[in-house]
Amino acid sequence: MQENQDSFSLRSVRNLADLFEYRANLQDSSNFALFSNAEAITATDLNTLANSLTQSILEIFSNGLGLRVVLLSSINQYQLAALAACWKIGAIACPLDSSISSSELSRLLGQFAANLVLLDSSLQNINTYKKVCHDQKVQVVELNSYISQQAETPNPNKIQLNCDTAALCIYTSGSTGNPKGVLLSHQNLIIGALNVVKSHEIESSDRALCVLPLSHLNGLVTTFLAPLISGSSVFYYQGIFAAQKVLEAIDTYQCTWLSAVPTLYATLMQPPIEQNFWSLNSLRFCRSASAPLLPQLIQEFELHYKIPLIETMGMTETAGQIFANPLPPKHRKIGSIGLPANFEVRLIDDFGNLCQTEKIGEIQVRGEGLMLGYLDDPEETMKAFDGEWLKTGDMASRDEQGYYSIQGRKKDIAIFAGINISLRYLEVEILAHKCVQDVACIVEQDRFVCEKIVVYAISGDKQVDYTKVTNTIKEILFPVLPSNQALKEIRFVNYFPRSGAGKVLKGKLKNLEVLWTSKRTLSNDPRLLLSEVLDIPLELVKEDLALGLVQNWDSLGYASLVIAVENVLNRKLTYDEILSLTTYEAISKILSQEKPDQTIESSLLFDNPKFTPSSDPSLLRHQEDLKSLMLRSGNFQSIRNQEVAMFGTKKNQTSNIRGVLTY
């Protein structure tokens, strides 16, 4: 396989257009891409679809070279074909999240200076997106209407491409400022895919499982281009991440490897799915990228699922992977991001000197995978480089065997009374004690000491005693802080806003509704309570609200609501009250000390003839989960009878009320 890849990369492929033609010319009748909610497609048919769309675009724009094209699509064959079509004509593709807000779409269309939007007709918000494009005077092509399978290949002589032709613009997460458009060439993307193939020894017999969007590098390069180059296949999991369904998909489609972010692996361990729901006999390894992976999570995951979890590290600016741990039986180090993967790497200290072994410095890299630069921003591009070396902003150390370990972000610090405090270090300390599921630390300005630290936390158990966990976090942090006054507040939230690659968008944490904070109390107003606990916009909390219509309604939200109402009333809820907490009317009556008249059937909308479904079926996805959960648990009084000991030996007692976790 190695020899085939080398000859393939050196002799056959000069650009991504060549890649699709190469794979199509193999005349492989087996499916390249499989989908949970759509028909599978071969590489040959995918190339044909791409050629058809290419012709449609060139009928509108006579020259595709340098054309700036936004892609708005869910994961399906049309999205894959649209990416291929852009690269065949030399256009710059900019895939965006299919659930992007209209205001964000409007901003990015302007920032990207888009010429064309390729739009998936099946998207729920298609009319809104069309209006935004019309207002921005951007041409729209609906993918499903324009693509046909009766097409001839465009004349390659009309399209002159080379390895340095710009192919992709991916916007950074904006965690440290405004998003910047990372411009990647055909060569960058090919090198990025080959790095994955070689590091993980991907063979033509392999099948990847993709659970990430193709609007970010981890999904696009790792689980689209890498299978394409290796001659292997990929299964695209469509829909909300549900732990048990993902494991079932691995078995059903015989996937051999999975690439995901640490949050998803943590989901698989909260709680671990019982072994009678999976076999995973086809799975060779799992790959983690896009964010640091806690050693405890690796150990617990491997102990339960018996599958190697391989930590890697990469950047959008490097077209993906920079480091990777070797696959077993080769030596790997838990807690390390591994060895350089086809990049030269150096560590530079604050004085610009090379760091020796075990010393901490900034990671700088150079190689063929480095970006062309930031789109239309030469000043920021210049700041990102030290000569030929890209400054990653990640701090790391290197051991005697050449393995690298992340030590934090260069600028991810708080300055308290002139003392630098590493926020990453605080996050690691809190997570190591397992008192919360996830944590992110930010700074807020203080006029006396410059900056104070605010801790945002997600509880792994929504029945947790927030006061007790808050006190535990303080016990963890105070010994390592220069002063107790450095900690301003601890806020609990339902989720962290993340990029498609899984990174926490710290700049957006302040916009979240807070479940509980060390400086506030819960409201007994049902509208405010529901808005806070379930993160529902206040204007949507109306008297006819049924929680099955709330997009983020699930069993964890249900348990959280039970605890919140009990905290407000300062008493335990009865069995009937617990079962009734699925409508605004019932919640309002309970908070008013009235007896609810909802039954479990009517409150959960089971076969309710008066119920009118939402126009968006995805908003109802958890209703059936909750029904199954209640039927499975049998007696919801167990919620009341079990006191959860977050810091004792009974942490897993809440597993019977968890249901399906989503991401």
Image (cartoon, rainbow, N blue to C red):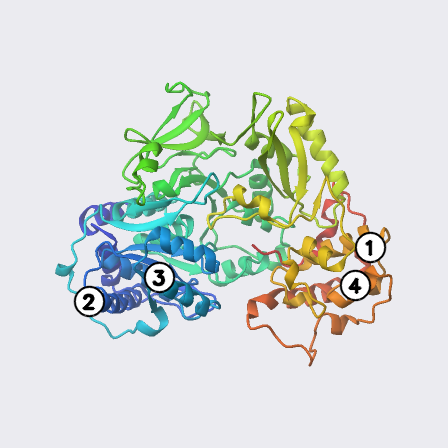
Residue 236: tell me if it is visible.
yes
Label 2 to label 1, Cα distance in Å?
66 Å
Label 4 to label 3, Cα distance in Å?
48 Å
Label 1 to label 3, Cα distance in Å?
49 Å
Left or right of residue 275, residue 584 in this image: right
Check residue 398 in the rendering and tell me which mark sits there, or answer none: none
Mark before the other along the chain sequence, 2 or 3: 3
* Secondary element at tag 4: helix
- Can you tell which of label 4 and label 2 is closer to the viewer? 4
For residue 62, what is the image quadrant? Answer: bottom left
Above-or-below relation of 53 to 381: below
- Can you tell which of label 4 and label 3 is closer to the viewer? 4
- Can you tell which of label 4 and label 1 is closer to the viewer? 4
Say which amino acid is labelled 4.
Ser
**Could you tell me residue 650's position as x and y percent?**
76, 44
Q: How many residues crowd mark 1 within 10 Å: few (<14), some (14–19), many (20+)?
A: some
Mark before the other along the chain sequence, 2 or 1: 2
Say which amino acid is labelled 1.
Arg
Residues at circles 4 and 1 in contact by the CB criterion of under 8 Å: no
Label 4 to label 2, Cα distance in Å?
63 Å
The C terminus sits in image quarter = bottom right
Near-viewer residue (193 or 230)? 193
- In this figure, which residue is indicated by the disc labeled 4? 588
- In this figure, which residue is indicated by the disc labeled 1? 640
Residues at circles 4 and 2 in contact by the CB criterion of under 8 Å: no
